[in-house]
Image: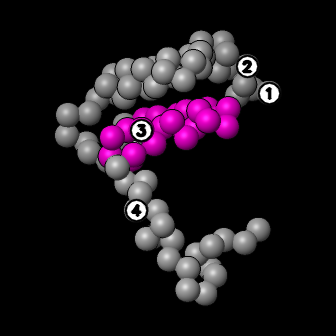
Amino acid sequence: MVYPAYMPGHKVEEQMLHLRPLAESGRMMMFAFDPGGNLRMGLEDPLRTVGHTNTDMIKQAIALADEVGRPIATYQNALDVLSS
């Protein structure tokens, strides 16, 4: 696998700047849903720690999942995936 950052003259930082607004708005989570991935979050994840609670982040994740039509895993769903 070739990583662009190791290619001569490649400026990954400049190309990634357009993702900053997505990260700051919480929309970066949408990338996990696109290829069928799963979303995990915890209190260490937010860029801004002031005013963010675990409940706030879970509500945001549920809203994004609803927006893209992805169901929320139950405890048993998660246990089945993690134990397989």
The tag earlier along the polypeptide, 4 or 3, is 4
Name the residue at 55% across, 79% down: 10
From what the image shows, is residue 28 above or below residue 9? above
| In-image side of 39 versus 49 (left or right) | right
Taking 25 as reference, is 1 above or below it?
Answer: below
Circle 3: residue type: Arg
Amino acid type of disc 4? Leu
- Residue at position x 67%, y 16% in the image: 77
Q: Quadrant of residue 27?
A: top left
Labels 1 & 2 near each other (Cβ < 8 A): yes
Where residue 26 sits, quadrant-wise, is: top left
Mark 4–mark 3 distance (CA, rounded to whole Å): 14 Å
> Which structural element holds mark 3?
helix
Q: Secondary structure at mark 2?
A: helix
Which residue bears the numbered disc 4?
A: 17
Q: Say which residue appears at 66% left-offset and 12% top-offset.
A: 76
Residue 35 magenta-highlighted: yes
Q: Are marks 3 and 2 in contact (CB under 8 Å)?
A: no
In this rendered view, identify the residue nearer to me: 62 or 40: 62
Q: Of discs 1 and 3, which sits in the foreground?
A: 3
> Residue tagged by mark 1?
84
